[in-house]
Image (cartoon, rainbow, N blue to C red):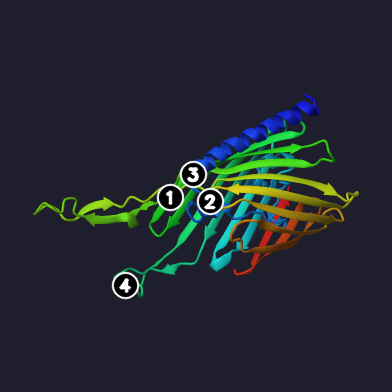
Amino acid sequence: MNIKNLLIRFSVVLFLFNISVSNLFSQGVTKVGTTSAKFLTIPTGTRAVAMGGAFVSVANDPSALFWNSAGIINLEKPEIYISHTEWIAEINYDYSAFVYPMGDVGTLGLSLSSMTMPSMELTTETFPEGTGETFDANSFALGISYARKLTEWFSVGVTGKFINEKIYNSNANGFAIDIGTLFVTPFDDIRLGVNISNFGQKLQMQGEDLLVQKDIDETQYGNNESVNAYLATDKFDLPLTLRIGISGEILKTDDSYLTWAIDAAHPNDNSEYINIGFEYSLFNKMIQIRGGKQSLFRNGSDDKFVFGFGSTQNVVNLFNLSMDYTMESHTYLSTIHRIGFSVQL
């Protein structure tokens, strides 16, 4: 297959993606704060976030399982990744991933993201000052991914994930998939990436906290006035997002390069926005400096800028250890700090 035909096919796929997703969005919720499992949209990967979240077409470390699973096909060795984020309002967000290349068969990935927060005092209408009990809330998503090259320049990836959200004694469960593509062009290896994430069923809270005592017929005298019943909560869409990105390298030498990246995102519960970022790698990845701007043109965005740095070291010729740090600055909310570690076996 020649380059011209490949470009035509990629353009057709991208066009169909846009039509399909636009139809989905036009039928769904388009208002802020009306989707479930919002933790699924928290940007993942210390390095990726430091580049302003412009990572869909870069996607060359285990955090690609979040941004574009097609990118894990470029990892040549098994790699483990762990990151921790001190999120706003004492919320903790943790992410871990494992990628295992299987040669010509493809590449397999596993990921786990979780959001936790401190316990809070339980209050009710009867006891507005507190009942003496506490409750907590947490969310997690467990994913399994598979990526494969269809040609030398074009790869696809898919992720299936189980999602759980819990508050006190009630929870919501569901399944979703992510689909991504990555295309390396013949023009200075400029990359194009497309990813649609969190396509799945609506979530609905259920559990013991929704159990009430109900008189099913208040007009009838002498019947049972305390029949067990469950309140029915609404179902909410998942935060479906389409991302399209482009990236490349300039100032390339034998041991250094400057990566630039631009992403455009279309969520179903907010306005469109753009992320831009860069990564300057020196001394064969011993020093990496990153920066970027996320959520450009998004309505009500509080993001100012992101900055980070990292280093990759070979440990006694056994494995490569990468350490990364990122700082996110906001106009009104507190500064967010992230740390991440990866081990390439």
Please name whichever residue, 161 or 108, is drawn nearer the observer in this view of the structure.
161
Number of numbered callouts drawn: 4
Residue situated furthest right in the rendering:
254
Point out the tag, 4 or 3, that comes first from the N-terminus.
Answer: 3
Real-space CA distance between mark 3 and mark 1, rounded to the nearest whole angstrom: 20 Å
Q: What residue type is labelled 1?
A: Ala
Q: Which is more foreground, mark 3 or mark 1?
A: 3
Disc 1: which residue:
172
Q: In which quarter of the image is residue 149?
A: top right
Disc 3: which residue:
28
Disc 4: which residue:
127
Real-space CA distance between mark 2 and mark 4, rounded to the nearest whole angstrom: 36 Å
Q: Element under label 2?
A: loop
Relative side of 229 to 196, left or right: left
Cβ–Cβ under 8 Å for marks 2 and 4 = no
Q: What residue type is labelled 4?
A: Phe
Point out the tag, 2 or 3, that comes first from the N-terminus.
Answer: 3
Point out the tag, 3 or 1, that comes first from the N-terminus.
Answer: 3
Q: Element under label 3?
A: loop
Point out the tag, 2 or 4, that comes first from the N-terminus.
Answer: 4
Q: Which amino acid does label 3 sit on?
A: Gly
Q: How crowded is mark 3: few (under 14 residues within 10 Å), some or many (20 or more)?
A: some
Q: Which is more foreground, mark 4 or mark 3?
A: 3
Relative side of 68 to 117, left or right: right
Quadrant where the N terminus is found in the figure: top right
Q: Which amino acid does label 2 sit on?
A: Asp
User: Which mark, by number, is residue 269?
Assistant: 2
Cβ–Cβ under 8 Å for marks 4 and 1 = no
Q: Residues within 10 Å of mark 4 (few under 14, many from 20)?
A: few
Point out the tag, 4 or 1, that comes first from the N-terminus.
Answer: 4
Q: How crowded is mark 1: few (under 14 residues within 10 Å), some or many (20 or more)?
A: some
